[in-house]
Amino acid sequence: MDYDKILALIKRIRVRDGKLFTISEVNFHLLTMDGPSEKDDAFYSCSTQIKGFFDIYLNILQEKEEISRCLFHEIVEVLWVVSGEDTKDAHLIALEEEERYFGKRKVNLDNVISK
């Protein structure tokens, strides 16, 4: 998988609701959120609006670097799923590659329980 190609796309893409893009012959539809969902700051699903596309839901109320990290992760995960990996393995691969390119994730202090 060409991770540098994915990073180049992320650097030049204008993040906006409804943005359509293709990478490695996989079609994506970007949907923005004004804050995290119940699931996460980003997640993907098969598009309910456009046949043959994957929707990527992305929280745009975070730092630009975190938006890029989330977008990278979701694209990588989808590409691995499309190539035949199961979703759990694809997620773990995406986490590993995300950390390789962006470093460890910041701890979300809101989710830490004090003892």
Image: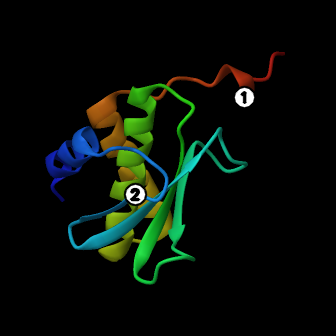
Residues 46 and 112: in front is 46
The three-letter amino acid code for the residue at tag 1 is Asn
Point out the image quarter for the C terminus: top right
Give the residue displayed 39% in from the left and 28% down from the top: 65
Q: Which residue has dot 1 on it?
A: 111
| Gap between marks 2 and 1 measured at Cα | 31 Å
Q: Is residue 110 left or right of residue 75?
A: right
Which residue sits at x=32%, y=30%? 102
Ranked by sequence position, the earlier of labels 2 and 1 is 2
Which of discs 2 and 1 lies nearer the camera? The answer is 2
Residue 80 visible? The answer is no
Please name the residue shown 35% across and 35% down the image. 99
Q: Residue furthest top?
A: 115
Displayed quadrant of residue 83:
bottom left
Q: Amino acid at mark 2?
A: Lys
Q: Considering depth in this image, is 97 or 27 the residue closer to the camera? A: 27
User: Whole-percent x and y of residue 23?
Assistant: 23, 63
Q: Measured along the vertical axis of the image, is residue 42 above or below residue 23?
A: above
Q: Quadrant of residue 41?
A: top right
- Residue 96: mark: none
32 to 109, vertically: above or below: below
Q: Residue 21's spot in the image, x, y percent?
A: 30, 62
Is residue 63 visible from the viewing direction of this image? yes
Closer to the camera in the image, 103 or 18: 18
In the image, is 8 to the left or to the right of 52? left
Q: Which residue is mark 2?
A: 19
